[in-house]
Image (spheres, rainbow, N blue to C red):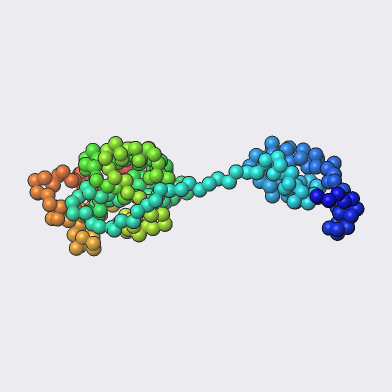
Amino acid sequence: MYKVSIRKACCYFELSYSVLYYKRRKSSQDDLIREELRLLAEKEQTWGFWMMRHRLKNLGFWWNHKRIYRIYTSMKLNLRSKCRKRLPARVKEPLLRPVYPNVTWSMDFMHDTLENGRKVRSLNIIDDFNREILQVSIETSLPSSKVISRLEELIEWRGKPEKIRVDNGPEFISEKLKSWCEFHEIELHFIQPGKPTQNSLIERFNRTFRTDFLDIYLFENLRQMRNYAEVWMWKYNNERPHSALMYLTPRDFLLKYGKLAQAKANEFPTFQQNLPTSTTEIVTKNSTFEC
């Protein structure tokens, strides 16, 4: 340690006296900036830094944005970024046709619009074994509670499946549906995000439902749409040949290859019994439709 004067030390390090003795003076306007930011934060709780900065600029305050940001962060006004909800890891599984009915069901949503512009959703459920439509539930809203309700109605007459394949929609990843499936000992299998081909059976059905039903008719209300859907579903299950089923109908394929005795075929009935088989009959019975 050598004692030297400040002058010699500054000369040695080539520093000017002004740098050594500089003391940052607090600007009198920092308090004004702080007050303006506080008022904006109380009034507009969802505004971030740049919204506030441009608002101050529009009010006639032309402070440097870095100066405003320094005070903004010191006041801890930074908005917390909402983290994206992370899904559990999804395991890719080969899409195999079950050898029995009620082994795997596939489930998905579709959207459409009524004549008055009202948006509706449909919950579509099929049996992967014979591509039979088990449910087309049409509502304006289908939260997880309604999904569970429709599944319970379905299980009452069809029996429960071993597995249900779904995508990662909010209704399907809900804790309610997860708990319900665990209670009934049903495996809820999720496809990988952004991989609709892993649920291709229901996706292929959705295409047919879109082209053969939704794109053909323009419905006035929910009741009309539901009634027409029932007729279309009956025709799909009982009359329409399916190319993936060797051009048998889903019902005929079930009876022929479902390993069921003819006498026990009613254990897996199509969900509609004694329904009108034409839209003309429906229109006659329901000449006045209601929502």
Viewer-proximal residue among 74 and 54 = 74
Viewer-proximal residue among 291 and 50 = 50
Is residue 190 in view from this perspective? yes
Task: Count the marks.
Answer: 0
Tell me: residue 157, above or below residue 65.
above
**Viewed as shown, does residue 198 lie left or right of 25?**
left
**Viewed as shown, does residue 21 lie left or right of 280?**
right
Query: Could you tell me which residue is drawn at 24 percent across and 45 percent down?
Result: 161
Is residue 120 in view from this perspective? no
**Location of residue 38 in the rendering, given as x and y in whole percent from the top left corner:** 73, 38
Query: Could you tell me which residue is drawn at 30 percent across and 39 percent down?
Result: 182
**Viewed as shown, does residue 262 lie left or right of 202?**
left
Query: Could you tell me which residue is drawn at 25 percent across and 53 percent down?
Result: 128
**Location of residue 282 in the rendering, given as x and y in whole percent from the top left corner:** 29, 46
**Location of residue 5 in the rendering, given as x and y in whole percent from the top left corner:** 89, 50
**Location of residue 268 in the rendering, given as x and y in whole percent from the top left corner:** 18, 46
Viewer-proximal residue among 138 and 176 = 176
Query: Could you tell me which residue is drawn at 50 percent across and 48 percent down?
Result: 84
**Viewed as shown, does residue 259 lie left or right of 134?**
left
Q: Quadrant of the C terminus?
A: top left
